Amino acid sequence: MPLADILDRIRAEEARVGRAPGSVQLIAVSKVQPLERVVAVLEAGHRLFGENKVQEAAGKWPALRERFPGVTLHLIGPLQTNKARQAMELFDAIETIDRPKLARTIARLKDELGHCPKLYVQVNTGEEEQKAGVLPAEADGFIAECRGLGLEIAGLMCIPPVDEAPALHFALLAKIAARNGIGELSMGMSSDFETAIAQGATHVRVGSAIFGERDYG
Ligand SMILES: *Cc1c(COP(=O)(O)O)cnc(C)c1O
């Protein structure tokens, strides 16, 4: 099945670029996919998934988690502050921390709930108007601000512009992470995850190459 092919390609690229076997984790992006496709991937033994909307994830994952213990769920889409509580209860990681107001809300809820998902800061490496994420020049300051609020930043995440070669964006994200002492890098999707692995990705987010094309109709 496509899942096994993608895992093979990840292992092959790790080996090719001299990364330790298993150092890259596959986040299967299940947004908008029919439930039976998601169940098939769970039945194949995969447990790490990504969703980009809180509401959509809330509608399917609580029941799937009961059926398939050991699921880890990452939020990879933009988060509104009014959904932060729900997101913190539902997700094991939030990859899209990108502004002070959201960081402050999460810091407050962390104290209130007594737990906090793993947090990544999203960086808008292409400085695209329509895209979420902090600008590269503001990343160091924002990471410091998050840490000042008592938030641990485990990783960085980016979505490069569709019309540019992704390698330079991945390299930029890796550089920002290195100078801030951040260990995890969520980068690379169906079309470019091997390039991301060569640039140091610890997590690749692959949707359509595993599940097939998304049907938004
Ligand atoms: C949908 C999505 C992906 C997966 O994209 P594919 O091209 O289907 O692999 C990865 N990351 C984010 C943030 C997404 O929204």
Image: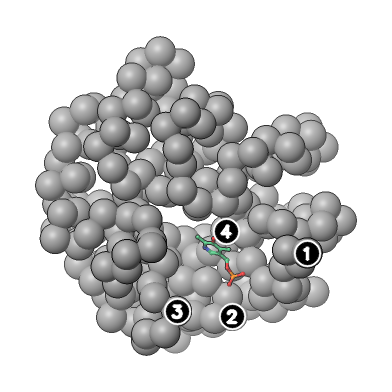
Name the residue carrying label 3.
162
Q: Is mark 2 within 8 Å of ligand 1?
A: no
Marks 2/1: CA–CA distance: 31 Å
Label 4–label 1 contact, CB within 8 A: no
Q: Amino acid at mark 2?
A: Arg
Q: Amino acid at mark 4?
A: Ile
Label 4–label 2 contact, CB within 8 A: no
Which quadrant of the frame does ligand 1 lie within? Answer: bottom right
Which tag is nearer the camera, tag 3 or tag 2?
3
Label 3 or label 2, whichever comes before in sequence order: 2
Which tag is nearer the camera, tag 4 or tag 1?
1
Residues 32 and 47: in front is 32
Q: Is mark 4 within 8 Å of ligand 1?
A: yes
Marks 3/4: CA–CA distance: 20 Å
Name the residue carrying label 4.
27
Q: SS of the residue at dot 3?
A: loop
Marks 3/2: CA–CA distance: 22 Å
Q: Amino acid at mark 1?
A: Gly
Label 4 or label 1, whichever comes before in sequence order: 4
Name the residue carrying label 1.
217
Quadrant in the picture for the N terminus: bottom right
Q: Residue at x 57, y 58 (%)?
A: 27
- Indicate left or right for 199 with 148 as reference: right
Q: SS of the residue at dot 4?
A: strand
Residue 167 percent coordinates (x, y): 34, 82
Q: Residue furthest right?
A: 36
